Image (cartoon, rainbow, N blue to C red):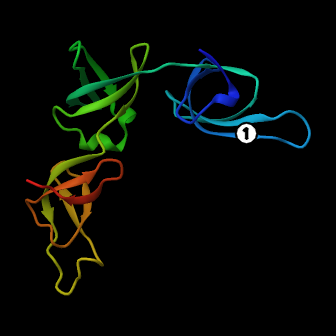
Amino acid sequence: MKINAIDLKPGNVLEHQNKLWMVLKRELVQPGKGGSFAQVELRDLRGGAKLNERFRTQETVERVRLDEKDMQFLYMEGDQATLMDNDTFEQVSVPRDLIGDPADFLQDGMVCKVMLYEGTPLSVEIPGSVVMQIVEADPVVRGQTASSSYKPGRLENGRRVMIPPFIETGTRIVVNTADATYVERAKD
């Protein structure tokens, strides 16, 4: 689908130079002399490279439609995550680096949002938070106040996270999957 460069928005996916690019930023520039143009920052969806491109405002670009599906995480084998489409029960393998660091928080049966282009997965988004158990927590140092300091703890998946002093080994907590930070104690 062709659209004018002036209508681009962050999050749009374009086909440009025989690659798929996601629009990160778009700024309209009106120089004192000459026609106005759109300064667009793009990221290659497959390679991850960034590109700054200028398009005249009336220039048309090819916008790509992506399919978004909810898929269930089944298992991790090596550096490949296997997900299943809940409607067709079709399974697809996705490289771990497509998911990034949040892949550490994948749990059996977790439903993830997968962006597909012509059946090929381009990105996997896992839920924003998960409940995990603390398997190792440093003891509380006397005199520390809860507001001033956090202590290191280890989650059941092996990741280290900073937790408040009142959290002990065996406690289940809510963890932000984007940056691996403590959110709150889990409600049982």
Question: Where on the picture, by quarter, is residue 140?
Answer: bottom left
Q: In front here: 47 or 36?
A: 36
Farthest residue, direction bottom: 143
Q: In front here: 154 or 70?
A: 70
Mark 1 burial class by Cα count in 10 Å: few <14, some 14-19, many 20+? some
Residue 13 location (% of width, % of height):
54, 26
Residue at x-position 49% and y-position 27%: 46
Q: Secondary structure at mark 1?
A: strand
Q: Is residue 2 above or below residue 24?
A: above
Q: Amino acid at mark 1?
A: Leu
Q: Is residue 164 above or below residue 91?
A: below
Residue at x-position 29% and y-position 22%: 93
Q: Is residue 88 left or right of residue 95?
A: left
Residue 29 location (% of width, % of height):
77, 41
Question: Where on the picture, by quarter, is residue 170?
Answer: bottom left
Farthest residue, direction right: 33
Q: Is residue 120 left or right of residue 106?
A: right
- Residue, disc 1: 28
What quarter of the picture does the N terminus occupy?
Answer: top right
Q: Is residue 145 left or right of residue 120?
A: left
Residue 10 location (% of width, % of height):
56, 36
Residue at x-position 15% and y-position 51%: 156
Residue 106 location (% of width, % of height):
23, 38
